[in-house]
Image (spheres, rainbow, N blue to C red):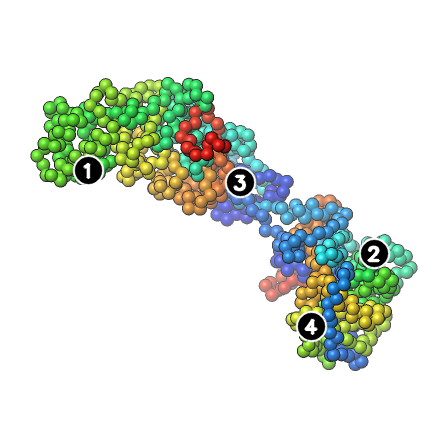
Amino acid sequence: MHSLKPVQTQPFQLNQQNFQQINGFEESTQAFRLRLEPIPLKPMRQESIVAAVDTSTIKIGETSQGIVIAVRGADVWKQNRAYRYVRLGPFVFHITDENKKEVYDALERSYFNYSQEHNHQGAPNFLQMPSRIASLLERWMQTMLSKTMNKGLILFDGSLTSGTPDTPTQRLKDILSTARRRGNIVLAFSKMTNLRVNGHVITDLLPRAAPPYLLETEGLRLKPPMVLLGDVYVARLTTGNCAFRLDIDKEVLPEIRIEATEKLLGNDLLSQSYPETLRLAHILCTFTANEVLAMQHFVTRRYGLQIVNRPDMHRLLFGPFGKGESYS
Amino acid sequence: MKLYKKEGNVLQILSFPNETVEKGDYLLVEDAEAGRGLIVQVIDAQFASIPGVLEELLRSLPDGGELIQGEDVDPLEIAPHITYIQDASLLICKIRASIENENLSPTSSWLPSRSQSTIKKLPLPALLKLAKIDGKLPIVLGGTKDSSLLAIDASSLDGRLNIITGKKETGKSHLSKLLMVNLIGYKATVVVFDLNGEYLSLGMTGDGKRNAYYDKIHVLTPSQNFKLALKQLNLHVLLGILVHALHLPGTSAREFRRIWQALKERDALTLHELGETIRNWNCNQHVRDALFSRYHALVNSGFFTDNVAEATLLEDCLLKAKEEGSGIIINLRNTSAIDRQIVVEYVLGKLVDSLTSWKLKAVFLFAEEAHLYLRETYWDDIVTRMRHFGIFTTFITNQPDTIRENIYRQADNIFLFNFTNEHDLDVVSRAARVDAETVRSIARDLPPHHCLVLGRVVRDFPMVAKVKALDVKTMGETRLFFKDSN
């Protein structure tokens, strides 16, 4: 079975997407610079709730009319030295060319109360549907966190770039302003970045200083309609060579941003510069192969859907040299 | 259940949580299109290798081994499906027979359809019927897991070599008693070498009353109610005792033969005369010493007497048993190792005599911990020569390595109780009528009083039964220091 192919060969995550903004649109300009003077950080033990959101989507099969996908989101927070989570889903959708707009509009309306006229982006194309639905769920969960938490740290997976098909600027602005009103700070960690200075990825340009520290960037301009709602830093929070792009809400004062990062250091575990809360959110929303099997079992049992067994053209044509189709 | 894989005579079947199948169960794999089926037995149940299970387990323990607390909002109720997949099991099954038109054949060369075959549990009564495990002389061993009775045919013990083995206190003696009383009930002659006095009260109920077998159980206790007069003995039986039990050298044995002939001619076959004759016999001093030491061993055993009235003839007991069937219990409790060997040597010699001369048809011999009294050469004798005379032995032991490998190879039936020790299981699995995996896998998990029956009695379909209770007085209990305080 096409969707089970990766399950049989284990690296099933080929087809899985933990939703994160792909910042392929972001291109660093000549003006973009990385300040190599580290801003040293000192863990601040003052009790703060650290919460993180992540979502994941996976194609669980193909039908003769379309695809069956599943989406799941996880909220993880650390409070009183214990991690807690709420996991939403899996939500299973049967997406066809005919129903994709209807499904997407219905979800958008129910999550964000936007009318169709308000939705300038329209329904995504068929192949983008899984990540777009996951994106909707993720933004809704972020909205809920920003509305319910007080004086906490909210960790996003990805950057604070808006104006992309996934992230309308107004939606991200609303999330950030709600968070600010309640005294929350949003810290957005990107596992990958395309931002380069002198040809080098910014997270590779680490000065010889003892972590934890932040490196500031300046002069990043995005092509319209994209808008960057945060300031970009390189965060090296633990020893080792790992560093991440960290976007912090632009509207927050620089010293508060530093303080928020120090609170994160004092309130969460960090491994390889990455916060445990965000790591757990990722782990908890990710689909395992047996869950894929279970969801296939569910759709065939509950809805009688016949999952189509399509041959893998890569394998068919190239034999052992065919590495399987990538989901793109 | 779904057919997954076949390797040799091992079939792997995928089973889901709502299908309750356990080790030892029989399954029928039916290929309706081919009109054939396979009878397989589950010898192990494993977790099916479901991809992603490790990740699933790992992510529930991310915080230094402490479970992360949380809530799952699962509106579509997919979690039960996840559990269903995760809990799927892989049944490792041994092909026992193939079936076509209700006829069984032991072949496993045929491969049923993976997609079309149906798999269902085969209840034991149905298997017993298919395998024709019944007969005119049923011995009910006990109940099976599906509440049916497992009965074997007494005739399947006839002419066979049997082994009852298992850990201490798992019910071996209980089963041997059960077999014994049933054989006696079918008028068979049963001789028991009772090492611990466990069979002495076979004729009594648990509350000390006489039971149906009371008149058929004869307990012979050496030097008490079981004594021999030299006059009643054949020379070769006594020589057997001297040579095999008391290790008399050949030269001395030749002198003894002469002494015996001399005494017999004088009609003076008494212990006293024997002692005097040895003392005065004209022979090498070393030979005399050797004969004297054996003579004293015979005297000290208390097993021999000059009083013919006091002597019990084993032959008489055997002849009585021939008509109505009976159990002759040779009580070896409180008997020294040497005396034990003297008694056993005598009994076996006498049995061979009686069988050779057709005074007896056949004898079922039950030997508990036989390594403690059976001389080396008798092992081969018992499984080869004596079997042709009509001695059908059942060995009972909790130390399976004390029975020689060739005995296992030739054993027709094995009644196996729980063993956990790998070495013990290895020894038993050398039996020709059973595959090692079945023994290792099933015997290890047998609860007390449950017995895995292997061999001819079950037509080579290994079956597990809980040995039924027997209303006989328990003897041979371990003496306890703290018994009263408990």
Left or right: residue A114 versus residue A265 is right
Q: Chain of mark 2?
A: A
> Callout 2, which amino acid?
Thr
Label 4 crowd bin: few (<14), some (14–19), many (20+), radius 10 Å: many
Q: Nearer the viewer, mark 3 or mark 4?
A: 4
Left or right: residue B325 versus residue B8 is left
Res A210 seen here:
yes
Marks 4 and 2, Cα distance to the nearest angstrom?
32 Å
**x%, y% of residue B110?**
50, 44
Q: Secondary structure at mark 4?
A: loop
Residue marked by disc 3:
B23
| Label 4 in the same subunit as label 1 | no
Q: Chain of mark 4?
A: A
Tag 4 near tag 1, CB within 8 Å: no
Marks 4 and 1, Cα distance to the nearest angstrom?
91 Å
| Label 4 in the same subunit as label 2 | yes
Q: Which residue is drawn at the image coordinates 52% and 32% (left, top)?
A: B144
Q: Earlier in the sequence, mark 1 or mark 3?
A: 3
Q: Which residue is at the front of the view, B338 or B330? A: B338
> Callout 4, which amino acid?
Pro
Q: Which residue is at the front of the view, B331 or B215? A: B331
Q: Which residue is drawn at the image coordinates 73% and 76% (left, top)?
A: A38
Residue marked by disc 1:
B248
| Label 1 in the same subunit as label 3 | yes
